Amino acid sequence: MNNEALKLLKNLIKIDTSAGKSNKEIVDYILSEIKNSMATITFQEIPNTSQYNLIVKISGEKSSKPLLFVGHTDTVQ
């Protein structure tokens, strides 16, 4: 793993996203890391909660099949 990826992983792990807490801090961190990319970024607040979605679309070649990654930003202790 290169130093940049390791730093990113360590910073993500430091953010407390235990169940029942807001995930805004980690979503904001991820957003800050990708905001200068060529991606289309959508930030969604989930109504009546303290939870947020971050949707990132990266355009590829039109002849390629799409690829989807899905992840969670909360943890369970």
Image (tube, rainbow, N blue to C red):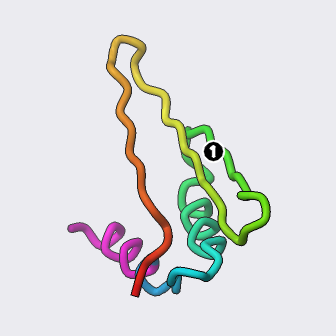
**Which residue extends farthest top?**
63
Give the amino acid type for the residue marked by disc 1 in the picture: Ile
34 is higher (above) or lower (below) than 75: above
State the residue at coordinates (66%, 71%). 24
Crowd around label 1: few <14 · some 14–19 · many ≥20 (10 Å): some
Q: Is residue 10 magenta?
A: yes
Asked which quadrant contains residue 4, the reply is bottom left
Q: Position of residue 63 (x, y in %)?
A: 35, 11
46 is higher (above) or lower (below) than 24: above
On the image, numbered disc 1 is attached to which residue?
41
Helix, strand or loop for the magenta stretch, by majority: helix
Secondary structure beneath label 1: strand
What residue range appears in magenta?
Answer: 1-11
Which one is nearer the viewer's eye here, 7 or 74? 74
Asked which quadrant contains residue 26, the reply is bottom right
Which one is nearer the viewer's eye here, 53 or 11? 53
45 is higher (above) or lower (below) than 55: below
State the residue at coordinates (70%, 52%). 44
Q: Is residue 7 magenta?
A: yes
Q: Can you say which quadrant of the picture contains the C terminus?
A: bottom left
Q: Position of residue 3 (x, y in %)?
A: 30, 73
State the residue at coordinates (39%, 38%). 68
